Amino acid sequence: MKLTVDNDSHFTLVSNPKTLSDVLLDVTQILGGDGQLIQSIVLNGGDIAPDALTPELGATTLDAIDTLEIVSANMMTLVRESLLEMVEVLPELPAVCHSLAEVLQSDNPVEGFGQFNQLLDIWEVVKERQLQAVNALALDPEALKVGEISLAVHNATLETTLSKSRAMMEASDFAGLGDLLSYDMNDMAQAESKITDALLKMLR
């Protein structure tokens, strides 16, 4: 196997890897010491998308790998870019909550099923990216304030509220879910922009 990391063909691994996963773990640990993360992987001349890194692919043995090219990027830069991608979308989150509430409280609430699932998916991505920033900055969620409460309390309350919203959807309590979206979830959606802005300021 010919390994190249950031155009360095003499990159030295610290372990004795047997599989692709072993190599990636080794490279990740070495790069992490310099604040770098793997950004892209080219295996035998073909790009590997992040969602293609399955356990099966990771189990590929080294004798099946001719070339492995890895490019890294600064961890803070990647996290900042990830948050910046959300900046334009987050202000629309409260509006999505409001419009979805109207649909669920209309004569055809079933039209809101797909939108509701999309909203939860979006929120999951938001929290994942914020967590990446919190970890990169080595912040304590208990100490980071979101208005009058900590980020830890905000996230715990959000998790409880989202679980409640799922239960309401499953029970077809559209009126109750509409109210939850209009008030509690709308307020929390507005807070997400403030959290992201605060994290971006710390990353600059």
Image: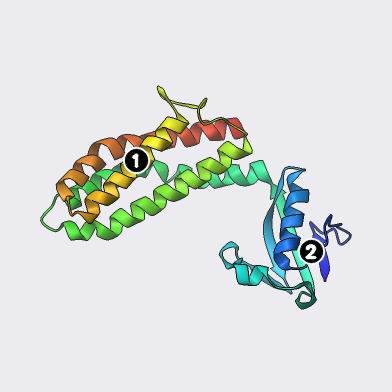
Marks 1 and 2 sit apart, C-alpha to C-alpha, by 42 Å
Q: On the image, numbered disc 2 is attached to which residue?
A: 17
Rendered image: mark on residue 144: none
Place of residue 92 in the rendered image (x, y in percent of width and height, measured from the top left): 35, 44
Residue drawn where x is 66% and y is 68% of the image: 58
Q: Tell me the quarter of the picture where residue 184 sits.
A: top left
Label 1 sits on what residue type? Thr
Establish if 138 lies above or below 119: above
Q: Where's residue 191, x and y in %?
A: 39, 33
Task: State which quarter of the image contains the N terminus.
Answer: bottom right
**Mark 1 lies on residue:** 160
Q: Residue furthest top?
A: 148
**Would you say 140 lies left or right of 10 here?**
left
Disc 2, SS: loop
Rendered location of residue 148, percent (x, y)? 40, 22
Above or below 97: residue 16: below
Q: Of callouts 1 and 2, which one flags the residue occurring earlier in the amino acid sequence?
A: 2
Q: Secondary structure at mark 1?
A: helix
